[in-house]
């Protein structure tokens, strides 16, 4: 009786679809600068509302989470039944698109969490509600800021930040399975699609890292 052919359970990254589009680091930096200009142009309560949108953007940018996942976050500390461990620099994100949702732990820069803390100190009445904004309203503001930052209309959607974070992590040699966990992907093949890059993107990454 012949032996069965060996099974390869690893994702075949060479046969996956073309990778999703993403923003390179210079565009991400320009986009963040435009968001901060947007906030600084506000005053009083308007500045408070604009800061909330900025905080959502920053978490999307630095966690790679889905928009719905960020909007569902409670900005209170873990000790007060919130989703953020300000001491460890971690956010507990409810993973969506799963039959059995669970919370994954995503590390975040302390500088980002400090901005959330400053918001809470300035507007204590918003504690626990910083991210409770309309998905549709955020989408509209995001497109407005993208236009200001010179980002093309086809890239002006919040999910582009998820794609960009995945590429950024992999370009900085974060292991594929770690990126899978950070993004909350069920299958490694969903993460492996971000390893597909063309010559133009490869050259861009090398220039960003000072290698070309």
Image (cartoon, grey):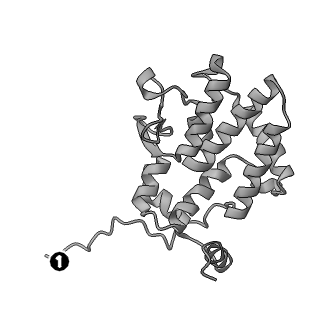
State the image coordinates of residue 202 (x, y, percent, origin top left): 62, 77
Furthest residue in direction bottom, as rendered: 212
Which quadrant of the figure contains the C terminus?
bottom right
Sort mark 1 into few (<14), some (14-19) or many (20+) by Cα contacts within 10 Å.
Answer: few
State the image coordinates of residue 101 (x, y, percent, origin top left): 43, 35
Residue identifier under label 1: 2
> Is residue 188 placed above or below 129 in the rendered structure?
below
Furthest residue in direction top, as rendered: 125
Observer able to see residue 143? no
State the image coordinates of residue 141 (x, y, percent, origin top left): 79, 38
Which quadrant of the figure contains the N terminus?
bottom left
Q: Is residue 94 left or right of residue 205?
A: left
Total marks in image: 1
Residue 80 in which image quadrant? top left
Q: Is residue 74 left or right of residue 53?
A: left
> Is residue 176 placed above or below 32 in the rendered structure?
below
In front here: 63 or 109?
Answer: 109
Q: Which residue is pictured at 63% across the width and 19% down the height?
A: 124
Q: Which residue is pictured at 58% across the width and 65% down the height?
A: 17
Residue 9 in which image quadrant? bottom left
Observer able to see residue 69? yes
Q: Secondary structure at mark 1?
A: loop
Q: Is residue 198 left or right of residue 149?
A: left
> Is residue 174 placed above or below 200 in the rendered structure?
above
């Amino acid at each position: 009786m012949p032996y069965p052919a060996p099974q390869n359970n690893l994702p075949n990254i060479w046969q996956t679809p073309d990778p999703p589009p993403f923003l390179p680091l210079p565009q991400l930096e320009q986009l963040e600068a435009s968001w901060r200009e947007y906030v600084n142009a506000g005053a009083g309560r308007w500045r408070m509302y604009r800061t909330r949108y900025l905080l959502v953007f920053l978490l999307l940018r630095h966690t790679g989470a889905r928009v719905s996942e960020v909007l569902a976050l409670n900005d209170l500390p873990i000790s007060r039944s919130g989703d953020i461990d300000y001491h460890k620099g971690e956010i507990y994100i409810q993973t969506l698109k799963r039959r059995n949702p669970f919370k994954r732990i995503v590390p975040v820069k302390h500088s980002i969490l400090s901005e959330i803390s400053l918001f809470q100190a300035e507007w204590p009445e918003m504690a626990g509600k910083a991210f409770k904004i309309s998905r549709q309203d955020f989408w509209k503001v995001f497109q407005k800021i993208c236009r200001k930052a010179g980002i093309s209309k086809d890239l002006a959607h919040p999910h582009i930040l998820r794609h960009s974070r995945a590429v950024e992590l992999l370009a900085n040699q974060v292991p594929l399975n770690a990126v899978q966990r950070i993004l909350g992907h069920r299958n490694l093949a969903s993460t492996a699609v971000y390893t597909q890059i063309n010559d133009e993107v490869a050259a861009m990454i090398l220039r960003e890292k000072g290698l070309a």
